[in-house]
Image (cartoon, rainbow, N blue to C red):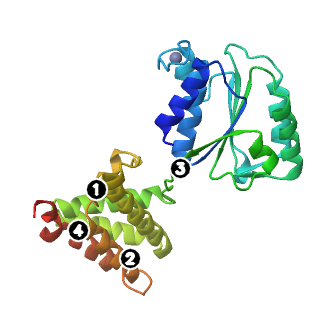
Amino acid sequence: MDSRQIHHFFENSVKKNRVCHAFIIHGGSDTTRKKSGYIAAKILECEKSPEICGECYSCRTIPTNNYPDVHLIQPEKRNLSIDEVRDVQQQMYTKPYMGRYRIFIIETDWMQAPAANSLLKILEEPPSYGIIIILARNNKNFFPTIVSRTINLRLNPEIDIPIKDDKALRQISEMFEAAAGRNWKALFETSGDIAKNFSREEIEDVFDSLILMGREHLLQNIESRQFRLPDDAYSGIIKIDNPGILAGLIDKRQYLKFNVNIRIFLTAVALEISSPKWRNWQTR
Ligand SMILES: [Zn+2]
């Protein structure tokens, strides 16, 4: 499923007046799972349900977690604790303040037996207005009793780009922009800054992210997968959109394992990307 199909699924449940009480939305990426959870909540709570009007109080406040009847629960290390389940239980049996439902969106991948048993009790006798939406990377670590009492909706595979260091990625993006614009002064300055400010390990992480992004970018054109770069600030990185550049990056990535000078390494990568053979690739 993609998030549009999740949309249809909840829309139809409302139309047919067959809304279930517990769901596990799994697969996809952190972003698409959360987006799907909010879509479900909006469909259930919107003034124009099963539509999502986008304007009513529910539609506006659900995504910012300010709607009183939709609760986002983010357990530490994605391990749902018994205390968290008890909180859910306590709030679950309080009637909704303003919505039709009381919805709990829980980002968890696993839970230990005591938490699972408590959750099971809620799943066995949910109040008519109580809804639990579990968002999980996969549903394999849950007890079968939990899985069998929930509707499992699987999102299409998608990877989470590991952006550990946003700042390094931003600067490398700037460096690529400078290279593409043949602005050598800016290119050498930025590569110098990056070499000075980040460790070899940090730069390795960033290059892994870049390679994954490039890979996703190529797949996007082929499979119409849903992939969005984090935001406009990464425009330099968007240029990694042909197989040659990606291959070049993967090739250069190997050098990081050896004791190359980081500044020279970065310059080599930027120059390769700015070289005419890559830029003309699409027009050949
Ligand atoms: Zn609305």
Task: Tell me the amino acid under the disc marked 3.
Answer: Ser
Disc with the residue nearer the chain's start (2 vs 3): 3
Residue name at image x 34 percent, y 56 percent: 217
Q: Quadrant of residue 257?
A: bottom left
Q: Nearer the viewer, residue 209 or 183?
A: 209
Please determine whether, in this image, residue 113 is positioned above or below residue 193.
Answer: above
In-image side of 80 versus 19 (left or right): right
| Pointers 1 and 3 in contact (C-beta within 8 Å) | no
Front residue of 248/256: it is 248
Tell me the distance, in whole angstroms, between the alpha carbons under discs 2 and 3: 25 Å
In the rendered structure, the answer to whether residue 17 lies left or right of residue 252 reads: right
Q: Give the Cα separation between the discs numbered 2 and 4.
A: 13 Å
User: Is residue 53 in sight in this rendering?
Assistant: yes
Quarter the C terminus occupies: bottom left
Please tell me the numbered disc located at residue 273: 4
- Which one is earlier in the sequence, the residue at label 2 or at label 1? 1
Q: Which mark is residue 59?
A: none
Judged left or right of residue 212, residue 6 is right
Q: Mark 4: which amino acid?
A: Ile
Q: CA distance from mark 4 to mark 1?
A: 11 Å
